[in-house]
């Protein structure tokens, strides 16, 4: 797909603002460069060498910071939701877009969620490991979907708890629910399913306003034909404010209820095609990396 410049305000109609420089910027999200993360290189099985992540396979679409009286899940499968409706409208016009969402369901009393949205590219449509992920079973997905997390800015105790370029296979550490559709895939990640992850969230929650965190999603490569690894998508959030999280009614969550308030995805009414064709700027920054031998 061709990349075209889109106005930045297309990404600013949620609780978070799209920022060119997210450091020390409250309630911001951005797209960090893939090279900020280390992934398995072509010779990893023998050398354990990791390399900069390079270009991501998916384009960033948005990041939502939301909360609800009940746990938020399955946000893209609701036919009444604006994202779902935008996808359906595009399909009716012969313009098909494949959207991914990764929903981190946080173990807080207000059921916060951080939801990262990405849209497929020509490169992602051709990637054989992505095809296996989409067509495989949950066992395969649980064994391969990898998260790389890095606390770019924040208190020492939070950095220590998370680790430096922390890597985990999400489905082995946390309970995940996958939902596949003709033009979407969504992953609901129950962070509260792990006592360790819950403890880290509770620690970090007290420092949200001073945290800048980078997250990258990777389908783990294990064989020569699956290497080097490619990053699916990456996102950064900075300076979250609990008071600025959008309150979603309990009737707006789950499979059979309304999705998100109109203003959350107001940009989609301005043209979904322009949004997904955006050439999103990345942010050059320096992070210290540490190889993990087995991930």
Image (tube, rainbow, N blue to C red):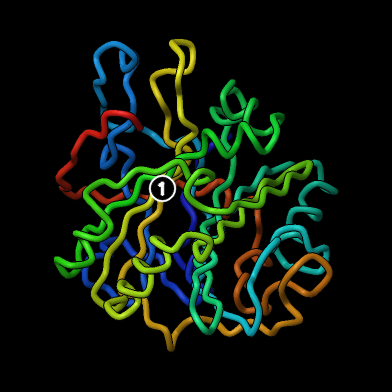
**Residue lying at the far front of the rendered structure:** 195
- Say which element carries label 1: strand
The front one of 29 and 101 is 101
- Residue name at image x 17 percent, y 47 percent: 287
Q: Is residue 162 visible?
A: yes
Percent position (x, y) of residue 117? 55, 55
Place residue 25 in its image quadrant: bottom left
Residue for badge 1: 234
Q: Quadrant location of the C terminus?
A: top left
- Residue name at image x 28 percent, y 52 percent: 150
Q: Residues within 10 Å of mark 1 (few under 14, many from 20)?
A: many
Q: How many marks?
A: 1
In the rendered image of this protein, does residue 162 appear above or below residue 16? above
- Residue name at image x 31 percent, y 68 percent: 238
- Residue name at image x 79 percent, y 65 percent: 255
* 24 to the left or right of 148: left
Percent position (x, y) of residue 2? 55, 36
* 64 to the left or right of 187: left
* 37 to the left or right of 180: left
Percent position (x, y) of residue 15? 48, 77
**Residue lying at the far bottom of the rendered structure:** 243
């Amino acid at each position: 797909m061709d990349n075209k410049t889109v106005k930045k305000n297309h990404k600013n109609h949620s609780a978070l603002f799209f920022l060119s420089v997210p450091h020390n910027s409250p309630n911001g999200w951005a797209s960090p460069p893939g090279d900020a993360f280390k992934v398995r290189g072509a010779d990893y099985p023998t050398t354990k060498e990791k390399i900069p992540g390079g270009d991501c396979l998916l384009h960033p679409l948005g990041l939502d910071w939301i909360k609800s009286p009940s746990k938020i899940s399955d946000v893209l499968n609701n036919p009444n939701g604006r994202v779902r409706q935008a996808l359906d409208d595009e399909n009716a016009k012969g313009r098909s877009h494949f959207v991914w969402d990764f929903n981190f369901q946080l173990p807080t009393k207000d059921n916060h969620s951080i939801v990262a949205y990405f849209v497929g590219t020509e490169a992602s449509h051709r990637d054989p490991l992505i095809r296996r992920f989409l067509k495989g079973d949950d066992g395969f997905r649980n064994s391969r979907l990898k998260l790389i997390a890095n606390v770019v800015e924040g208190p020492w105790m939070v950095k220590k708890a998370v680790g430096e370029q922390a890597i985990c296979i999400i489905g082995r550490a946390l309970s995940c629910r996958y939902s596949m559709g003709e033009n979407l895939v969504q992953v609901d990640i129950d962070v509260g399913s792990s006592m360790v992850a819950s403890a880290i969230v509770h620690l970090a929650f007290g420092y949200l306003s001073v945290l800048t965190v980078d997250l990258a999603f990777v389908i783990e490569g294990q064989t020569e034909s699956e290497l080097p690894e490619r990053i699916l998508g990456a996102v950064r959030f900075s300076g979250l404010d609990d008071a600025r999280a959008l309150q979603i009614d309990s009737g707006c969550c789950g499979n059979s209820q309304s999705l998100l308030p109109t203003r959350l995805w107001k940009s989609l009414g301005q043209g979904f095609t322009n949004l997904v064709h955006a050439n999103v700027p990345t942010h050059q920054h320096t992070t210290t990396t540490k190889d993990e031998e087995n991930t």
